[in-house]
Image (spheres, rainbow, N blue to C red):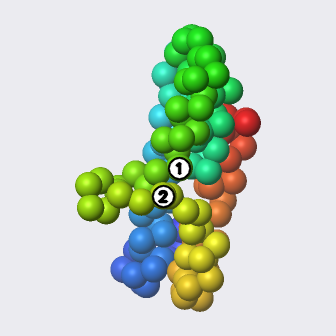
């Protein structure tokens, strides 16, 4: 049984994928909460907040490394590059979450709300504040 009274075999492909992602998120949350009692080595960071979180929290407070203005500028510069864009695929990174949400099917939206939204909110509540 999965997510209430439904069998995993009754899930659509979209629901199965969302449920799998939610399971991965739940595992990360469990690991973080378990490690919290032993001074966790992990930090939750929302993807959209990575550059600011590195500058304001992760590097100075987690790794205890001073970061100067040049370091901050370098982080901001690198964060503008598309991470998978090497060599001929090099390009500037552009936010595309809204675009992806607009083209998502109703099935993907509903599966995400059912399976991912609750765990995402839990993770977001524990994420590094920027």
User: Residue 10: x, y in percent?
Assistant: 42, 83
User: Residue 77: x, y in percent?
Assistant: 54, 41
In this rendered view, identify the residue nearer to me: 101 or 66.
66
Quadrant of image for the C terminus? top right
Find the distance from the CA under tag 1 to the CA under tag 2: 6 Å
**Is residue 6 visible to us here?**
yes
Residue pointed to by mark 1: 80
The total number of labels drawn is 2
Which structural element holds mark 1?
loop
**Is residue 62 visible to us here?**
no
Q: Is residue 104 above or below residue 118?
A: below
Residue pointed to by mark 2: 92
User: Residue 83: x, y in percent?
Assistant: 40, 51
Q: Quadrant of residue 120?
A: bottom right
Quadrant of image for the N terminus? bottom left
In this rendered view, identify the residue nearer to me: 107 or 3.
107
Q: What's the residue at 64%, 44% (across, down)?
A: 49
User: Residue 12: x, y in percent?
Assistant: 43, 84
Q: Residues within 10 Å of mark 1 (few under 14, many from 20)?
A: some
| Tag 1 and tag 2, C-beta contact below 8 Å | yes
């Amino acid at each position: 049984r999965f997510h209430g009274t439904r069998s995993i075999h009754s899930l659509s492909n979209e629901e199965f994928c969302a449920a799998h992602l939610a399971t991965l998120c739940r595992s990360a949350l469990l690991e973080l909460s378990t490690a919290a009692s032993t001074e966790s080595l992990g930090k939750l960071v929302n993807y959209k907040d990575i550059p600011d979180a590195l500058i304001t929290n992760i590097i100075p407070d987690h790794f205890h490394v001073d970061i100067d203005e040049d370091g901050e500028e370098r982080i901001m510069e690198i964060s503008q590059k598309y991470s998978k864009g090497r060599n001929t695929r090099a390009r500037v990174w552009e936010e595309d979450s809204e675009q992806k949400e607009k083209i998502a099917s109703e099935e993907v939206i509903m599966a995400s709300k059912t399976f991912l939204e609750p765990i995402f909110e839990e993770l977001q509540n524990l994420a590094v504040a920027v």
